[in-house]
Image (cartoon, helix red, strand yellow):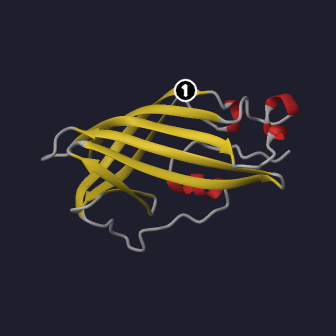
C-alpha cells in the first residue's frame, strides 16, 4: 500500500525525493551571501505522533553551510538552499513540500527550522528546533493512510519535532 512515509529530513534532498518533487537549488556550488562556515549538528527527537508514516530516528547528525547577506540568512545542505530571516541572533527557515500518497491523498509537509545563533559577531554555534507538520491538503482523502485503515500514519495531521545544536567545523 503506498504511503507518504519515508525519512524525516536528514538532508533536504532526501525529503524532496520522498515526494518526487524538485527542490530549488542555489544554481551554484557556493551559497549566496557571505559564508558563516560549515556546521555539524546533532538532532534529538522530542515528538513523533505520526508513527511509522514518518521515519524519525531518535537522533541523527548532519552538516550544513550558513551564509548571510544584508537581507537574509541562508541554510545550504546537499545543494539546496533555504532562505531565512534573522533578527539579531534568532533565525527562521521554512521548507514546504507536497507529496502524492495515492490518487486521492496529497500530503503537505512543512518544516520550520528555528535557531538562536551564539552571538551576532561570531556565529560559531547555534541551537534550535526542527518542527515538521504533516497534513492532508484541503479536500484530500487520506483516511486510508492511517494505521486503523492499514496505512502507516498513527495520526493525520501529525507532527515530528527535534531539538538540535550545531557548531562550526
Q: Position of residue 64 (x, y in %)?
A: 37, 51
Residue drawn at (66%, 42%) of the image: 135
Picture quadrant where residue 100 is located: bottom right
Picture quadrant where residue 83 is located: bottom left
Q: Position of residue 123 (x, y in %)?
A: 20, 46
Residue drawn at (44%, 63%) of the image: 79
**Left or right: where 95 falls relative to 64:** right
**Left or right: where 147 falls relative to 8:** right
Q: Secondary structure at mark 1?
A: strand
Height in image: 168 above or below 155?
below
Residue drawn at (28%, 49%) of the image: 86
Height in image: 79 above or below 107?
below
Residue for badge 1? 47
Q: Position of residue 126 (x, y in %)?
A: 28, 39
Picture quadrant where residue 23 is located: bottom right
Q: Position of residue 59 (x, y in %)?
A: 49, 31
Amino acid at each position: 500500500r503506498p504511503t507518504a512515509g519515508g525519512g524525516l529530513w536528514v538532508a533536504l534532498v532526501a525529503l524532496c525525493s520522498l515526494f518526487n518533487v524538485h527542490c530549488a537549488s542555489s544554481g551554484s556550488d557556493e551559497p549566496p551571501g557571505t559564508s558563516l562556515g560549515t556546521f555539524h549538528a546533532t538532532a534529538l527527537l522530542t515528538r513523533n505522533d505520526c508513527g511509522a508514516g514518518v521515519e524519525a530516528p531518535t537522533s541523527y547528525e548532519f552538516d550544513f553551510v550558513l551564509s548571510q547577506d544584508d537581507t537574509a540568512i541562508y541554510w545550504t545542505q546537499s545543494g539546496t538552499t533555504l532562505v531565512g530571516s534573522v533578527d539579531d541572533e534568532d533565525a527562521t527557515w521554512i521548507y514546504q513540500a507536497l507529496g502524492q500518497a495515492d490518487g486521492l491523498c496529497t500530503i503537505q509537509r512543512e518544516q520550520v527550522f528555528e535557531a538562536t545563533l551564539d552571538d551576532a559577531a561570531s556565529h560559531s554555534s547555534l541551537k534550535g528546533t526542527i518542527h515538521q507538520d504533516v497534513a492532508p491538503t484541503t479536500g484530500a482523502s487520506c483516511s486510508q493512510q492511517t494505521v486503523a485503515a492499514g496505512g502507516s500514519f498513527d495520526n493525520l495531521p501529525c507532527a515530528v519535532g527535534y531539538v538540535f545544536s550545531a557548531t562550526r567545523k
